[in-house]
Each structure stands twice: as structure tokens, then as C-alpha cells.
Image (cartoon, rainbow, N blue to C red):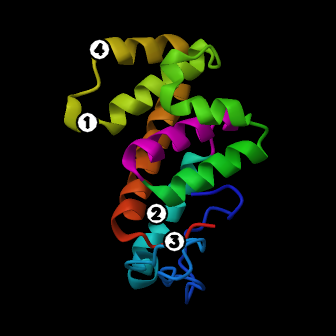
């Protein structure tokens, strides 16, 4: 979900250039086609999801932090559209290329604040639930970095981006770019 798209996910009627590059033109980009335009096929659910997304953006948390969270969850979930979108939104909001490149290895760099680290750790734990529940230690670190309202809004943000990622990675309903 992008801030620049006014909180609306919608696949175009057609995807220009969506055919794979020919074998003879190896330098042309390969644009994966839309698999299933779930937004068009179930518009009532898409409207509800967009409303949930819009509500999750009405937060006291800084937008730069939220874009890092959205980008990191999207990386973990393998949603190319959302990685592209939220990294672009983060750059538009003033985020540095260096920090975006370091996001997958944030634990190993000095580029993130304690508050950002707590948010990223919670994001990873909540996104990787198949690895186990969010531990008491991870939740305690997040609770120490955020007030109750902030933490609730952060958890909603993580939940919403994970839902978008599952749509994007499964149906690939939105072209990248």
C-alpha cells in the first residue's frame, strides 16, 4: 500500500509490457504478469481492505518508522510490489539509500535507533509466526520503546502490511513500476 497512491490498491485493466522478454532480447526487463486481479474480482473486500489500511495510517507514529516496518515485512514475505512501493515511499519521505540497503541486515549495522530496532524486531517476529509466537522478550523490548497506543498502532501496521503482502505474493495483482 502506498501513500502516493492515496491508499488504493487496484490492478490496471491491462498490463503494458507484461509479456516476458523474448529469448533474442536478453537485455529487456522481464515484467511478471498479473496473476489474478483480486481487487477487481472481489471489489467489496478490496474496499474494506483499503479502509483498514487507511485507518492504520491514522497513527501517532512517525511515517519514516512505519515505512521501514512495511518494507521489512514485505522483504520477509517476498512481495516484490510492496518492497518496491514502500522503499520508494521511504525515499520520498527522506529515508537514505544506505539504510534501505541495510534493512535486511539491520541488526549488524549502526544505522538504526533503539526505537527502530525494537519495531523491526517486532515486525520480524510477528511476520515469521511459523517460527514461533512473538516471545515475551521481543514484546517487552517493543513495550519499552513504545507507549501503549503507539505499540497498538505498530501492531496494526504490521498486521495490515502482512495482509497486503499475502495478496501481493500470492495473486500478484499489481504490476511493479
Tell me what residue is drawn at x 77 percent, y 42 percent.
93
Q: Viewer-nearest of labels 1 and 3? A: 3
Dot placed on the residue nearer the N-terminal end, 2 or 1: 2
User: Which residue is labeled 2 in the image?
Assistant: 49
Q: How many marks?
A: 4
User: Which residue is labeled 3 in the image?
Assistant: 174
CA distance separating discs 1 and 4: 14 Å
Pick the residue in front: 38 or 110: 110
Q: Measured along the vertical axis of the image, is residue 168 above or below residue 11?
A: above
Whether residue 2 is in magenta: the answer is: no
Horizontally, residue 100 falls left or right of residue 153, namely right
Tell me what residue is drawn at x 49 percent, y 32 percent.
104
**Magenta segment:** 58-78
Q: Viewer-nearest of labels 2 and 1? A: 1
Residue at disc 2, secondary structure? helix
User: Which residue is labeled 1 in the image?
Assistant: 129
**Callout 3: 10 Å neighbours few (<14), some, many (20+)?**
many
Dot placed on the residue nearer the N-terminal end, 1 or 4: 1
Horizontally, residue 35 falls left or right of residue 15, namely left
Point out the residue furthest to the bottom here. Answer: 13
**Callout 2: 10 Å neighbours few (<14), some, many (20+)?**
some
In the rendered image, residue 152, in percent from the top left (x then y), is placed at 47, 31
Tell me what residue is drawn at x 69 percent, y 49 percent.
89
Q: Are marks 3 and 4 in contact (CB under 8 Å)?
A: no
Q: Is residue 151 at all visible to an observer of this figure?
A: yes
Tell me what residue is drawn at x 45 percent, y 49 percent.
160
Dot placed on the residue nearer the N-terminal end, 1 or 3: 1
Q: Which mark is residue 136?
A: 4
Amino acid at each position: 500500500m502506498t501513500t502516493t497512491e492515496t491508499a488504493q490498491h487496484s490492478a490496471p485493466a491491462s498490463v503494458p509490457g507484461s509479456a516476458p522478454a523474448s529469448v533474442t532480447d536478453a537485455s529487456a526487463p522481464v515484467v511478471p504478469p498479473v496473476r489474478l486481479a483480486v481487487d477487481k474480482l472481489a471489489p467489496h473486500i478490496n474496499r474494506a481492505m483499503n479502509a483498514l489500511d487507511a485507518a492504520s495510517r491514522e497513527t501517532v507514529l512517525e511515517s519514516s518508522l512505519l515505512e521501514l516496518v512495511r518494507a521489512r515485512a514485505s522483504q520477509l514475505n517476498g512481495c516484490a510490489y510492496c518492497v518496491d512501493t514502500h522503499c520508494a515511499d521511504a525515499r520520498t519521505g527522506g529515508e537514505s539509500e544506505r539504510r534501505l540497503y541495510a534493512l535486511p541486515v539491520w541488526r549488524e549495522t549502526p544505522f538504526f535507533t533503539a526505537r527502530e530496532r525494537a519495531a523491526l524486531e517486532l515486525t520480524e517476529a510477528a511476520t515469521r509466526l511459523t517460527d514461533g509466537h512473538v516471545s515475551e522478550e521481543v514484546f517487552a523490548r517493543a513495550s519499552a520503546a513504545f507507549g501503549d497506543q503507539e505499540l497498538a498502532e505498530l501492531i496494526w501496521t504490521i498486521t495490515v502490511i502482512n495482509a497486503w503482502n499475502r495478496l501481493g505474493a500470492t495473486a500478484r495483482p499489481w504490476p511493479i513500476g
